[in-house]
Image (cartoon, coloured by chain):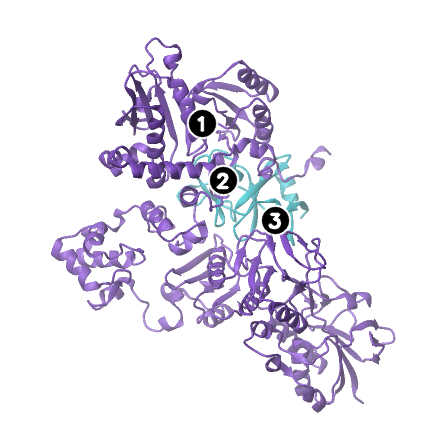
Chain colours: A cyan, B purple
Amino acid sequence: MNWVSIGSISDIPCRGARCVATPEGKIAVFRTADDQVYAIDDHCPHKGGPLSQGIVHGTAVTCPLHNWVISLETGKALGADEGAVRTIPVRVEGERLFIALEALASRAA
Amino acid sequence: MTEKLVIIGNGMAPGRMLEHLLEKAPGRYQVIIFNAEPRVNYDRIMLSPVLSGEKAYEEIIIHGDGWYIKHGITLYKGHKIVAIDRQAKTVTSDHGVTEPYDKLVIATGSVPFIIPVPGHNLPGVLTYRDLDDVRAMMLAAQSRAKAVVIGGGLLGLEAAAGLNAQGMDVTVLHVMPTLMERQLDPAAGYLLKRAVEERGIKVITKANTQAITGNGKVEQVELADGTIIPATLVVMAVGIRPNAAIAKEAGIAVNRGIVVDAGMRSNDPDIYALGECAEVSGQVYGLVAPLYEMARVTASQLAGDEAAAFVHSDTPTKLKVTGIELFSLGDFADGDDRQEIVLRDASAGVYKRLVLKDDRIIGTVLYGETADGAWFNDLKKKQTDISVMRDTLIFGQSYQGGAPLDPMAAVAALPDDAEICGCNGVCKGKITGAITGKGLTSLDDVRAHTKASASCGSCTDLVEKLMVLTLGDTYNPAAVQPMCSCTTLGHDEVRRLIKAKGLKTIPAVMQELEWTTSCGCAKCRPALNYYLVCDWPDDYADDYQSRFINERVHANIQKDGTYSVVPRMWGGVTNAAELRAIADVVDKFEIPMVKVTGGQRIDMLGIRKEDLPAVWADLGQAGFVSGHAYAKGLRTVKTCVGSDWCRFGTQDSTGFGVRIEKFMWGSWTPAKVKMAVSGCPRNCAEATCKDVGVICVDSGYEIHFAGAAGLDIKGTEVLGLVRTEDEALEHIVALTQMYREQGRYLERIYKWAKRIGIPEIKRQIMDDGDKRRAYYERFVFSQKFAQVDPWSERVSGKDKHEFRPMASVGFAQAAE
């Protein structure tokens, strides 16, 4: 696994998200109320809405386009909706955040 | 021949280790201790009671001088070790004493972390670590002056409580949004803050200390936001780090702490480390339970038991402040594979949360009532399957035993004289009697007739259960639509309770109103944020993370994730310079679509989020501000050209529209508000299907409201006719404020009016001058805080994180 530094946890607002640009598209990196960090593709399985722009509650985000609720842990849609988005491994070392880049490359391949 | 055991440090961990060692291998070692502090081993955990005056130093001594003599231990008091010579196997103190060792134990503990702000070394800045610090604080407290404690963790709060007990005026500064955020979730952190404040200690969260200033001694603390707090004493309690310097100098492996194996042995086989200075499997520890475990392991190892090994276990955290009960254990993060059980009892100040995974407890937060902490800890440790007692688990051990309680059966079993509503003293018999005797079928009826659940509402659940028991299936408890699945309360109750209880933050609302989730959902959070913005305009800090994206970035999100931007055109009036500026922006940012809106302004669509601040900067240069086309707030005031141009115009409808818009822009409302002013009854501005409309006539201004032309189509109601423009403005503003205060989030004016009744609105706005002016003044007050152009704020850097990716990765690899 190739861990790439993407910045510090303090770069992300609490109960918010920031994007990481990659050649294969944006990854949304979320920080929950209790400072857990998750990364998923910034692309709602429903109609491609930017999940990074949604409201973060618990370990889920509500898509800004049509209110699908996506689990940050599994990437799966919660409730009655069906669909899933890819999750990307995150490692937190102190303040620093890393995501697994090989997982990205494998998607391009 | 006895071996020589030298111990550096004389804190609680090596003290406990010696007790074990003397028991396991008496006489095996000749023990020599170097203590940098000039005293014996005392109970550091009890420093807080010493500071608060509840205990004396003599009471917290663990090993008195006699103990050392009895066991033949040499204790060098006030000797700091300055060198370890691993070749010669000796240690040397700052007083020049050198002692040889066969085995060496390093137990140097930790050092307080000092924030390196300017002025951190001024006289009057203290840490909170040992008895000398406590004595210095007690001396400073004699002046009865002001103290600032930096750090709202365990240590900082204990220091603050102690100084407060000594009569000082104490302010706690904490950099995070809630206190003790490592041990507590935000809800418990909120309760803690309230309890601390009730003792007269001020708490400032999100406080970023910038400097400590004073002339030769501490005089004040300055925060990054410009706040200045006078203080003669500053206590830094922001954290500790392992004190491993001496080991590092001696070439022993040091990471965060001195790296030891599970047997507490460093990479030098004759040197052990334990206590806060030691790092086992990447972890360092600060609470006493694991340190005592280290002491046990080290003693066994020194006694020859090489199998002894340190095993990590979670340790509960407790706050040692008299009167505040708090317990935290394990992992309490949310997660899909986890369930939570939350018990909130607002009146008793109790909050309990259990986090479960696979029917086992993995985390516990208890506040206000911690008696069951030990039991929960035991269940967690033993990984007990709790599924059989799940329903009553949170009520604690004493509830367990028989069959799980059926909540309905429990209510049915209550005697008739059992009190149901504490606020109004209503017993069960009175409620059931009223239901059958008067034929009541709704909760509101029961409230009206018995007053039960009509005050704080915390017994609503019980009252509804009584209704189900009495009425059977004919009672539908969902008659009051809850705000969302996080609460049983409806919007109106929540709004009423926010005012009645003076709730001023989202965590406060969730705690006091007993939310069933820890941080709400995408439905309730924006609603609560609006209610708090509306009710406490000067106090409440708008929570942007609880706003929908459009209100967070001041643009409208489109289906492809791009945004549209609408600048304000007051009353729909523009000019060549403005149009030119818009044209330039469209060219410069290659904006793919420009459209005239129904509200008489210009919409630019397809703007990339990253470009938004630059677009606003250019528009701002031309004098534009945000049109709030995205907001649950005042959007447009549409106008016709009125008496200035039109041959039928009766009043200056354009000028009045511009005036309304300039007066009311920036205000947040339950749902969007669109207005219009027509200069004559021909109504070219289409004022009679707006939220608020004005039809100008010869004799004055006819004010309309509660129209709709969206999902529903509805002509307006007439509020009334007033003579002057000033009066018209006052009436419109008062009406809007009434709606702002009573409307449910996302409820448009026409729905609100239907609910309240048109006559009631007319009575309050047209007939009751005092009420109208009070509404008007509250709106004007609120506007002081609301009329800030969000675009220019963001051009000057506010929330800039919103508009930039935090990193770009993988592009180099892709190019290869």
- Residue B494 visible in the current orientation: yes
Asked if residue B739 lies left or right of residue B416, the reply is right
Q: Which amino acid does the dot numbered 2 rest on?
A: Gly
**Mark 2 vs mark 1, CA separation in Å:** 31 Å
Q: In which quarter of the image is the N terminus of chain B?
A: bottom right
Query: Element at badge 2?
Result: loop
Q: Mark 1 points at which residue?
A: B662
Judging depth in this view, the residue of B440 and B291 nearest the camera is B440
Task: Indicate the quadrant where residue B34 lies.
Answer: bottom right
Query: Element at badge 3?
Result: strand
Q: Name the residue under label 3.
A: A90
Q: Where is residue B625 in the image (x, y as percent from the top left)?
A: 52, 27
Q: Which amino acid does the dot numbered 3 rest on?
A: Val
Instruction: Indicate which disc residue A54 carries.
Output: 2
Q: Give the label, 3 or 2, closer to the camera.
A: 2
Q: Do the residues labelled 3 and 1 touch (CB within 8 Å)?
A: no
**Mark 3 vs mark 1, CA separation in Å:** 48 Å
Q: Give the label, 3 or 1, closer to the camera.
A: 1
**Mark 3 vs mark 2, CA separation in Å:** 20 Å
Q: Give the label, 2 or 1, closer to the camera.
A: 1
- Residue found at x 31% / y 67%: B405
Q: Which amino acid does the dot numbered 1 rest on?
A: Lys
Relative vertical location of residue B415 with respect to residue A97 in this rendering, above or below: below
Asked if residue B37 lies left or right of residue B630, the reply is right
Asked if residue B282 lies left or right of residue A39, the reply is right
Instruction: Indicate which disc residue B735 carries.
Output: none
Graded by Cα atoms within 10 Å as few (under 14), some (14 to 19) or many (20 or more), the crowding at tag 2 reads: many
Relative vertical location of residue B126 with respect to residue B629 in this rendering, above or below: below
